[in-house]
Amino acid sequence: METIRLNESEDRDFIERVSRESGQAVENCYQCGKCTAGCPVAFAYDLMPHQVMRMIQMGLKEEVLRCQSIWLCASCVTCTVRCPRKIDVAMVMDTLRIMARRKGMVPPGRGRNVAVFNNNFLGSIQKYGRLFEFATMAMFNLKTGQPFREANTGLTMLRRGKLKLSVTKPRGLEEINRIFEKVRQAEKEV
Amino acid sequence: MKFAYYPGCSLETSGKEYDLSTRAVSKHLGIELTEVPDWSCCGATAGHSTSHLLALALPARNLALAEETGLDVTAPCAACYQRLALACHELNQNPQLREKVNEITGRPFHGKIKVISILEVISSVGLEQIRAQVVKPLKGLKIAAYYGCLLVRPRAIQIDDPENPQIIEQIMQAAGADTVDWPHKTECCGASLAVSNEEVAIPMVSRILKAAAFSGANCLVCACPLCHFNLDMRQLKVNRLRGTNYHLPVFYFTQLLGVAMGLNPQDLSLHTHFVDTGQVLKLVG
């Protein structure tokens, strides 16, 4: 791990902004490590959950927002239910993802495909109102340069009636589009 | 008993076994399900990873549509359940936020209905009543009940204890099955990473299969289409990549309940899994 120079990189507002946006008292974390101990994805992380919490406290904004862990967090919420300081760590992770995205940061390493997947997923909802599994997967494969990924699985599913080549769109598609637009507007105003 | 029914996107495709078996079992138990008219996606993980407001507005539209039916709403999918239940909780806690979200959706949700998981709906029939419907007890089945994350966390919406839930075991025992004690019933299977980072999801699936096999279970029973797909489809891959030889069919609890109640196997879609279910179902006779 690289050396952290606190006097050069700290951003004192960071903890306050993360706390406000997540609704969590991040300053209450006393580094017991229980979040990390129970995290099922910790083996794949670059920063452990308790390190993320400590680094928010120290104002290391750039380091936290450019880590892979915030994208690899599976949102299983084990950290949250076990936290002795009642901090919703999973919500903090959500907030960090949202902040990184808002800043237009390209997620590094393994985080990249998570962001591609999320964007595709939401794109499908905006376009069809529901998740069109087939089209979303095909698009993900194209965007990540692996056109035949899971082709056999897809064929098996098709044969067993578990993959549809069309999607049942709700009638209220305009309503759904408006939701996306209005959320975008509301977030711009903040 | 009447409920509004929110199937969710995957129950139309990759999780169709869950939809078919839920409808069949509910009908048999006298639970009337009315599909939420014109429902749309709940946003799932992509939604709450991207925008807190969007993660409320997408479920809120569906809550409002369900409320128009005047019935409490049930969602079989654990992810849909969590998103709808969390949105409902947050909007009820914060009237100002509810107003803001209602303005965004254009469909006011008043907080007059509850979100209930299908596990709670079925168990509310009563274990005695369920037992009375069993014509083919699941004798010979040793079940590892797998809950995953979304039904038991976070606290505001958990349907059972987040570390040692029992609701699936109770229903399966009422259907005549044996249940095993095992440590991984609420361990995350990594389904949200399964597409984007399969190499991260594989060890997570592998750990769960290992624990289930070690406990002596001959199948897994779940209540989530994402867990199901991840554990069923990826089991073959785990075997190939790790040189293991797991053969643990993954059932939805509604499928096995349907078997116990003597429902038509066609209505339960028992043969569309990746891991063949035949050998294990033979144990029931």
Image (cartoon, helix red, strand yellow):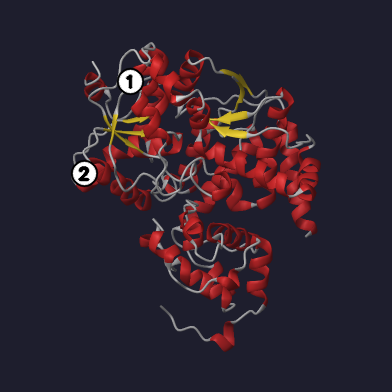
Whether B122 is drawn above or below B92: the answer is above
Q: Residues within 10 Å of mark 1 (few under 14, many from 20)?
A: some
Q: Residues within 10 Å of mark 2 (few under 14, many from 20)?
A: few
At mark 1, the secondary structure is loop
B131 or B280, nearer to the observer: B131
B8 sits left or right of B238 in the view: right
The single residue placed furthest to the bottom in the displayed view is A7
Whether A148 is drawn above or below B18: the answer is below
Please state which amino acid type lies under the numbered disc 2.
Answer: Phe
Please state which amino acid type lies under the numbered disc 1.
Answer: His
Sequence-wise, the earlier of marks 2 and 1 is: 2
A73 or B13, nearer to the observer: A73
**Chain of the residue under label 2:** B
Residue at 58% from the left image edge and 57% from the top image edge: A91
Q: Is residue A60 visible?
A: no
CA gap, disc 2 and disc 1: 25 Å
Quadrant where the N terminus of chain B lies?
A: top right
* Residue at mark 2: B214
Quadrant where the C terminus of chain B lies?
A: top left
Whether B244 is drawn above or below A82: the answer is above
* Residue at mark 1: B271
**Chain of the residue under label 1:** B
A60 or A32, nearer to the observer: A32
Instruction: Give the mark toward the camera: 2 or 1.
Output: 2
Residue B119 % position (x, y)? 48, 31
Residue A130 % position (x, y)? 60, 32
Residue B20 % position (x, y)? 46, 19
Image quarter for residue B67? top right
Q: Is residue B176 visible?
A: yes
At mark 2, the secondary structure is helix
Q: Are marks 2 and 1 on the same chain?
A: yes
Whether label 2 touches label 1, CB < 8 Å: no
